[in-house]
Amino acid sequence: MKPDEVSAAAGVAQAAIGLLTLITTIAITVFVYIGTRAIARIEHDRGIRDAWNSLDALALSDPALLRVAEDLLPGPGSPTGSSCKAARRKWFAYMALNVLSSMYNGATRGLTRSRPDALMTCEYHIAMLVAHDDVYALTQEGYSGPFAAFCRGIREKQIAAAAGSGSSSS
């Protein structure tokens, strides 16, 4: 090779290396941005869920605070002036649903070790909760659409199973 050819090849190689470095830098920046944004969303969700659970625990800690919570945030289907027992039941259900909602969101976002196991655990606990009309109503208000749909699907399975077992015993 002549010196001019070597120099031209070196120039092309340097340009290719520079372009590859630029593309790699851009790709790394995009991946870091996407990862950081996902972590920020997860932390935001967790912070909100923790705040709601703190409010729920505070409401459950004192009958007077429970009455205040019921007056300010009556929830779906709650009659005005509902009993203290019904209010405690609702606010405890919110605490359980908040945990299950977080577990569901983590599983669907791929944050758990085993998505199928996490979803199966959620389904098991939610099935017990949504068997009650009052608690089922809570799942359909104030939770993400996918979580509400997950709860609705579990409830529909229960209704179908009850209808199937009722018709087979006739």
Image: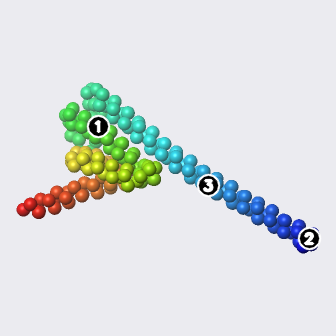
Q: Nearer the viewer, mark 2 or mark 1?
A: 2
In this view, which residue lies farthest toward the bottom? 1
Q: Which residue is mark 3?
A: 30
Q: Nearer the viewer, residue 133 or 10?
A: 10
Badge 2 amino acid: Asp
Q: Position of residue 41 (x, y in %)?
A: 49, 47
Q: CA distance from mark 3 to mark 2?
A: 39 Å
Q: Position of residue 164 (x, y in %)?
A: 16, 61
Q: Position of residue 80 (x, y in %)?
A: 22, 37
Badge 1 amino acid: Trp
Query: Residue at horizontal 41%, vertical 37%?
Result: 50
> SS at mark 2?
helix
Q: State the quadrant of the C terminus.
A: bottom left
Q: CA distance from mark 2 to mark 1?
A: 81 Å
Q: Which residue is mark 1?
A: 91
Dot 3 or dot 1: first in sequence order is 3
Q: Nearer the viewer, mark 3 or mark 2?
A: 2
Query: Residue at horizontal 80%, vertical 65%?
Result: 13
Q: Residue 15 occupies which quadrant of the picture?
A: bottom right
Q: Residue 98 occupies which quadrant of the picture?
A: top left
* Residue 71 numbered tag: none
Q: Which residue is mark 2?
A: 4
Say whether residue 73 is visible: yes
